[in-house]
Image (tube, rainbow, N blue to C red):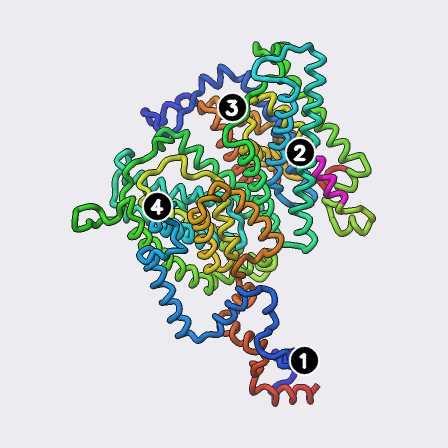
Amino acid sequence: MSMVDGPTPLPGAKASQAAEDREAAKSGPGTSADAPRGGMFKSFGARWNALPRQQQWAWLTIVVVLAYLLPVINPPLISTEPGNNFALACFDMARFALIAVGLNVVIGYAGLLDLGYVAFFAVGSYTAAMLTSPDSTFLKIPYLWTVPVAMAVAMFFGVVLGVPTLRLRGDYLAIVTLGFGEIVRLLATLIPAMNGQVGFQNVGHPPGLEADGTPIFSNANGTPWYWLVLTVLIIVLLLAGNLERSRVGRAWIAIREDEDAAEIMGVPTFKYKVWAFAIGAGVGGLSGALFAGQVGFVNNQKFDVVTSILFVAAVVLGGAGNKVGAVLGGALVSYIPLRFTAIAEYKYLIFGVALVLIMIFRSQGLLPARQRLLAYGRLAYNRVAASGKGGTPPSGGAPGTATSTEAGA
Amino acid sequence: MLSTLAMSVPADSNWINFDVPALIQNFWSATFDGLTFGAIYALVALGYTLVYGVLNLINFAHSEVFIVGCYGVFFTLSFLGFGPSVPNLDFWSIVLNLVLALVVAMVASALTAFVVERVAYKPLRKRNAPRLVFLITAIGVSFSIQYLIFLWRGPNPEVALTMFRPTPIFDVFGTIIDSQQLVIVLAAVVMMVFTDQFISRSRTGRGIRAVAQDPDTATLMGVNKERIIITTFIIGGLLAGAAALFYVMRIPSGVQYSGGFVLGVKAFAAAVLGGIGNVRGALLGGLLLGLIGNYGQILLGSSQWTDVVAFVVLVLVLLVRPEGILGTSLGRSKA
């Protein structure tokens, strides 16, 4: 074999790799190179990734089944009653989790700060309301058809807003989205056709009747709505996970880590930023349509900008860039004020302060993203994790060739 | 031609109405009113521009720095016995009281800016945090201060205070310019000229420009970067405090926990319009945005349209000329 060209490992690099291996072997398994940063959540994540695929699936199935059963079991300590109906609280948690997963694509993956996410949520809500409520003059379509329409309209607004701003530095996006969040609310007030505070009553809902003739998806019954949103959430999670592992996801992470470097390496950063923003907007519209259906009433009082900041807090709290973290963060941000009604009044202050404290002391959130390793895919991740723990080095059969290289040099 | 365009909008006018005759009729009063608002925007915009020039950070908390100043004005004047009715005082004691309120507001705002910088931004700078972390912290701080005020003062605006009765001074094109408008515009312009001169002539100003241009080189040349950053925040705070007095003078019922937010977005739009990081751009952008917003408000029929118009202007500027009208950054303005 040729010793001159081709990527053979440098002798120095090999030596340092060996030293690292010895170091790892000395300190024993469990203390991999990147372990100390995360505390208990990190070690949980490491253990989870060490499990075989089948066991992961088994555990996931249990978690999903438990999640579906949550409003039926109504566990005593966790329950939000008597203050709030638990099934509706579950719906709200799932809704927030869905929003957080959508916003996580924008903030967590692509590293763009969207401070007006509630606007896309509002666009989705209004689309669903205006296409189903008897109060509007638009043509009427069945509720379930409004969901994709709401997503499309929200994505359209995302593109309209994203194209002028995303060509520029990231911080312009923050202020433009912040403004947009307020503008949507103002337009809902100012344009007569949007009905202002009067709003739209009797927004549609999915079909289906109980035995006694009442609709299954009624406003007061949270359980079917919760199941619907949970199903949507799982689908969106699977899709987001696929995107994350694809070429698109790698491009997003490259943009987040260093936009200039990504551009130089040939990543069309503008295109992928617009995609991230539009996909985030689409998920926002989707959750808005679901929300409008459950509440059954949409007016201009439901979409203030502060809610946007709550959404950002959900993503950041859970761990930007980690979709499981986003679910956790979204559920927590919704759950805490519903469970502890005594502090519900202070929720904005609490989450505002939490936002600052997290950023100063633990900017990766509760469940940190597997930032760099993610880019190489699961295989590489496992190999690095294995070598970090003092297992066999990845290049098992290499020593012979490496020695020959050294001899040649 | 414009009116035919307005006619072609659907007859039931369910979407947006353009009231062109009203705009033509009120053109000059709208202009002077717009300039007055524009002067206030410009003062707040300076705070955004200076911090952006030096740190490359949108200081979202600046709108709260401003609203703290408004509360400073409100409490000082309430303490001095001002109320909803016109005060029964002679000219000089009113001037004295207003100057006192101005000083209190400037100190309160500057102090807020200082505390925000020390508590929130400095720890991040020390460990060289990514930009996203700075932005999220900034919005978190803004949000926290806003809801502290909310919990303290409740959701409703404070009692409207009248500082003095606006008296007509002279008229231009048949439109009366009153003392209030004149005071606001003149005082704001004087302050901005002073700031501009301070930045382009004084030793500290040279330091600010040096840090804006290249923080590392400036540090090597003996500029104390930390001190420059604090100074920048304090100057922004002082100007926001001054803007607070004029704002309360013009919109007495605007002292409210959320009052800073929309004004903040508009002031930022003004800064971008003029060219962010550019001191003179802030003045130009502020005045222009005040005019555009006021015309839009009369054209469309409700005062809330000013916010929408300002936002549309921001997006259009970013689309067409993102570097703003004057364009140059703080570091590159003339030495």
Ranked by sequence position, the earlier of labels 2 and 3 is 2
Ranked by sequence position, the earlier of labels 1 and 4 is 1
Q: Residue B228 in magenta?
A: yes
Q: Which residues are magenta?
A: B227-236
* Residue A169 is at least partly visible in this image: no
Looking at the image, which residue is at 66% across and 37% down? Answer: B112
Which of these two is toward me, A117 or B147? B147
Q: CA distance from mark 2 to mark 3?
A: 31 Å
Secondary structure found at label 4: helix
- Of all chains, the one bearing label 2 is B
Residue annotated with mark 1: A19
Q: Are marks 2 and 4 on the same chain?
A: no
Secondary structure found at label 2: helix
Tags 2 and 3 in contact by the CB under 8 Å rule? Answer: no
Q: CA distance from mark 2 to mark 4?
A: 42 Å
Q: CA distance from mark 4 to mark 3?
A: 36 Å
Looking at the image, which residue is at 50% across and 53% down? Answer: A315
Tags 3 and 1 in contact by the CB under 8 Å rule? Answer: no
Residue annotated with mark 4: A289
Q: Residue B326's x, y, as percent?
A: 65, 35
Q: In front: mark 3 or mark 1?
A: 1
Q: CA distance from mark 3 to mark 1?
A: 72 Å
Q: Are marks 1 and 4 on the same chain?
A: yes
- Crowding at dot 1, Cα within 10 Å, few <14 / some 14-19 / many 20+, comes out as few
Q: Number of labelled discs?
A: 4
Residue annotated with mark 2: B109
Looking at the image, which residue is at 56% across and 75% down? Answer: A384
Q: In front: mark 2 or mark 3?
A: 2
Q: Residue B115 in magenta?
A: no
Labelled disc at residue B295: 3
